[in-house]
Amino acid sequence: MTRSGTGATADLYWEDLRPGRRFDLGVTVIDGDEMVAFARRFDPQWYHVDEKLAADSEFGALIASGFFTVSLFMRAYVDGLLSRAAAAASPGMEELRWLAPVRAGDRLAVTLEVLEQAPSRAKPDCGTVTLQGTMTRLTEPAEDVLRTRFRGWFLRRDRTV
């Protein structure tokens, strides 16, 4: 039995992750209390934690730390793909862009697209997959708020290749 990224039985392998394949990873709603608690602990810049200063700024209200937003992307990625994939870790991130401010109450749709796929030179029982993740605000103004491109190693179904 092959385990997924969360320890469950895997049913998605490198061979299944062909370029062009898209995954809908669901919708997440930004909880204001979680957003501020994260910022207080990890990114206590004024526009993330000080309501008065943020209200009087170009932002008009508190905005989420970009790292909070990317952590929500990661949760959606784990729940929507890694929980069923024969994932073998990640050799790294190539791009992380915060495209627009995120605020409490925003509804963000999370999608993932397979961009490239190749056998791994470093791990012969794996293949490398390049993925692009996007978070899109569904509330006004509707726009992409995050884009990331990264690589993952996934076990091959046939590990004797």
Image (cartoon, rainbow, N blue to C red):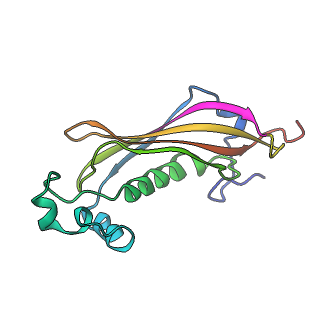
Q: In this view, does 36 lie to the left or right of 72?
A: left
- The x, y position of residue 112, in whole percent, is 50, 38
User: Viewer-proximal residue, 51 or 110?
Assistant: 51
Q: Is residue 119 left or right of residue 160?
A: left
- The x, y position of residue 106, in whole percent, is 25, 49
Q: Residue furthest right?
A: 160
Q: Which quarter of the image is occupied by the C terminus? A: top right
Place residue 94 in its image quadrant: top right
- Residue span colored magenta: 111-120
User: Viewer-proximal residue, 59 or 7?
Assistant: 59
- The x, y position of residue 155, in whole percent, is 75, 45
Name the residue: 32% across, 66% down: 34
Q: Is residue 76 left or right of residue 104?
A: right
- Is residue 113 on the magenta stretch? yes
Name the residue: 70% across, 44% down: 154
Q: Which residue lies furthest to the bottom in this view?
A: 41
Name the residue: 65% across, 46% down: 85
